[in-house]
Image (spheres, rainbow, N blue to C red):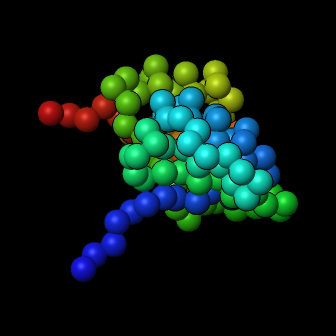
Amino acid sequence: MTSVWESLTIDARDPARLARWWAEALGYQVVSEKPDGVEIRQSADHSPALFFNPVTDGKDRKNRLHLDLRPADQEAEVERLVDMGARHVDIGQGDVEWTVLADPEGNEFCVLREREE
C-alpha cells in the first residue's frame, strides 16, 4: 500500500492573503477558509492542495522544501509574479537556469525554464 499526496502545508502570518496570492499565481481556487487555515486547489476535488496554516512567528531562514513552477514562458511568468508581489531572492543558487523568487511572506520558490521536448 502507498500513500497519496493530499496537501502541502505552508505556515503564514496572514493565511487568507497568502492563499489568495498563491491561488492567483497557480490558477487555483479557495476551497475552504476557516479560522484554522485556508485551503486552495485546482478544483474542489483535485489533489494536491496547498493549505495555509496560521502562525504568529515570522520566517527566519531558507525553506527546506519549496515549489518549482514550470511555465510556458519563464521570463513572462517571472515578470507576472513580480508584478503580483513576489521578489527576487538570492539563496546562494549561483548562475542557474531557473529564477528564485519569494512570495509576499518570504517563502522561496523557483520558476523553471520551459520544458524542452
Q: x%, y% of residue 68? A: 43, 46
In the foreground, 89 or 34: 34
Q: x%, y% of residue 92? A: 57, 54
Q: Is residue 59 above or below residue 43?
A: below
Question: Could you tell me if residue 54 is visible in this image?
Answer: yes
Question: Could you tell me if residue 90 is visible in this image?
Answer: no
**Could you tell me how many numbered marks the image carries?**
0
- The structure residue drawn at horizontal position 71% and vertical position 51%, both measured from the top left corner, is 34
Quarter the N terminus occupies: bottom left
Quarter of the image for residue 23 reads top right
Q: Is residue 1 left or right of residue 6?
A: left
Which residue is most to the left?
117
In the foreground, 11 or 28: 28
Q: x%, y% of residue 105? A: 73, 45
Q: x%, y% of residue 83? A: 64, 21
Q: Is residue 72 left or right of residue 75?
A: left
Quarter the C terminus occupies: top left
Quarter of the image for residue 54 reads bottom right
- The structure residue drawn at horizontal position 39% and vertical position 46%, both measured from the top left corner, is 46
Q: Is residue 1 above or below residue 50?
A: below
- The structure residue drawn at horizontal position 31% and vertical position 31%, both measured from the top left corner, is 114
